[in-house]
Image: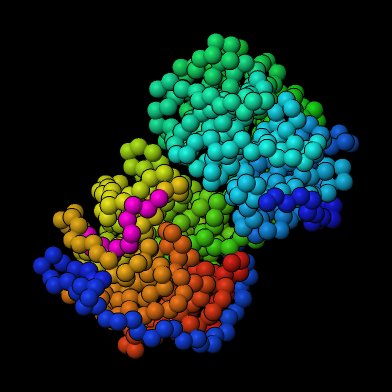
Amino acid sequence: MMSDPQHRPTRRHLLGGGIAALAALPVASALGAPALADPVRPAAASLIDLGPALASVNVRSVAFGQLQDGRSVAYALSNGDPATLSVLDVLTGERIFGTEIPGAELGGFVTPGPDGLIYFTCRSPMKGGLFSLDPVSFEVTLIAEGISGQSVLYDGSFGPDGRLYMGTYPNARVLAYDPATGEIEDYGTQTEDAAYVFGLGVVDGEVWVGTGPVPHLFRIDIASGERTEMQPPAHVMEGTDWFTGIAQRGDLVFVRLSPRGTYDMAVYDQLTETWLEEIVEGTFDTAPTAVARLNRVYYLQGDVLMGYDLRMRRTLSVGFEDSALREELSEAVGTYGIASSEELPGLSPYTVVGLNTDGVLWTYSTRRKQGSSVIADVLASPAGAHSIGTGPDGAVYMGAYLSSGVIGRIDPETEEIERLRGPKQADTIVAHGQQLVISSYPGAVAHIGDPSAAWDWSAFDQILMLGRGAPNYQDRIFGVTSVGDRIALGSVPDYGQLGGALTILDPATGDLEFHRDVVPQQSIVTLAHSDGLVYGGTSIHGGLSTTPAQDTAQLFIWDVAAAALVSAEEVVPGAKVIPEIAFGPDGLLWGLAGEGTVFAVDPTTGAVVHRIATGLPFGNNWGLLTSLFSRTSEGCLYAAGGNALLRIDPVAATADVVVDSDVRYAALGGNDRIYLAGEINVYRLEE
């Protein structure tokens, strides 16, 4: 397909201890623990480059419009390294223009402006970049980044004054950009108890602002800046922690809520100034279309296109749930942008168009109850591994961060990387007997399936969803280990929450034990099992937008049969996270501490027998970007951390650097070869 040259953005404006193994056994105190061993020594190693871990389309933001020549188009931001922007013909899927966004891996919002330009945001590692696209010349301009010290810009909406209003993280600010003057007005932090202004919309000339994870809904007078907090009724606020989207359509305002289990949508009537009693359940994170024929808007309820009658104030079916198109799109992670034929004159009347995360562009006739799809030529981009693990088949699997639903697999025989369907974000991948367990975000979900069969992600069974919000308040599972026929899972709580959980699950029956705050106010990020005891490492950090209440991470022991905590103690003074633990070939329990110590504990006595200083930071707040595993054939362990690969000799109590850069994760394949996931590419250690 044809595409214009990939223009690069031009800069225009920049703003600026010890632990007891059993209650009856002796405990080695911190005073009695060994002194730190000698630090790591560098070593040389050769690597074989296997190529990018994953390369895919991952559309997260979409807006629709028309070019000067009359073509109806979609403006699509796709996540990757770097993120990309594509302009697509909605009738054919042809890419008319595409460009990479250097310095950004994640797209934000995209919206047409009244001046004819298209405005969009990107981030990570850049701080909240605001861009414009000229749809005539296809020039991309970086307008500003890091405005008022903000990392993320959310939900841009133009007001009647022609200014672009945006919410922010981490200080829950509201900003207004004036394209005519280039000036940016900062309306300040909206509330001190929430870090996000996530939902924002312009309603009858006012800016409505929704926060999270502590929910507030404000109305801001554009001229005066005066802010008034709205007080939605109990049936709207019950279970609501976030206001995630605000869109006025006619006399109604559609307000999307989270988590409420599956994301819901409340409706506010501007004429009567009341909230309707009906809560529209299970809506996806996509705004309703503009008002279409028959005084309707269209929205997504899960993966089903639905209609809403603005006059009758009620939902209605458009037949999508029974269509062949729904079945065709069944494996898609989601659709982040839809539009009606009233917005896009090139479409037939009574038609809705959508663009899925994986680049599938679909159209559906609400009159004929039929649809079709094409694969749009979205500019793809490579992505690094977010997680890594070895399956029972010996293959190494890699999860992706907020993907379009992909998993990578390294074939142990050919070492080719396969791209497979999977969850949006695989956080942990482990073998359980002959099955593969994959945990995913959001909502602390786990699936299980047989990787030896022809790969079919839809055949994997969802065996757990702890869920955001009440009653469990869990969001991410990073620690997973087999406990006989059962599985132990350690989790990080929801946004704004402290206190992770240990869940013991029988995947055959679904029976589970849920134990929150095993270590009070700490998350559980790594697990190991031996002889009926589950060992776990914690992080003092909870969900995003929380302040730790404890000072030091702990290593705990849980008696599975008794369903009781045996002990929980500090093993490395000052460590904020214990990101990895694993049993070594010497029978000791080895682990990594976040501040850079490799340690070993004797499980029979509870004594800390080794502490090795590495000078390398291990893991982030939750212990990501680390790995630890035993290599029996060599009688040693390997650890990934601090962007390096270390070889741990348990006899000599040394940790030597084998690879000193571009190491995010590591795993031992069934072929006894070591694979490394770098920022983008995957390597095999040559020996």
| In this picture, residue 151 sits left or right of residue 230 | right
Tell me the quarter of the picture where residue 336 sits.
Answer: top right
Give the percent coordinates (x, y) of residue 112. 75, 36
Would you say residue 666 is visible in this rendering?
A: no
Tell me the quarter of the picture where residue 157 sits.
Answer: top right
In this rendering, is residue 239 above or below 669?
Answer: above
The residue furthest left is 24
Q: Residue at x 58, y 81 (%)?
A: 47
In this rendering, is residue 540 above or below 155?
Answer: below
Q: Residue at x 71, y 58 (%)?
A: 102
In this rendering, is residue 70 above or below 27?
Answer: above
Residue 394 part of the magenta segment: no
Give the percent coordinates (x, y) of residue 409. 53, 64
Tell me the quarter of the picture where residue 104 sits.
Answer: bottom right
Would you say residue 541 is visible in this rendering?
A: yes
The structure's colour scheme is rainbow
Q: Which residues are magenta?
A: 547-558
| In this picture, residue 230 sits left or right of residue 636 | right
Number of marks drawn: 0
Give the camera-side residue of 45 and 452: 45
Give the percent coordinates (x, y) of residue 162. 75, 30
Prevalent SS, magenta region: loop
Q: Residue at x 53, y 21 (%)?
A: 267
Give the percent coordinates (x, y) of residue 617. 46, 70
Residue 552 part of the magenta segment: yes
Give the camera-side residue of 440 and 448: 440
Give the camera-side residue of 354 and 502: 502
Q: Residue at x 68, y 46 (%)?
A: 121
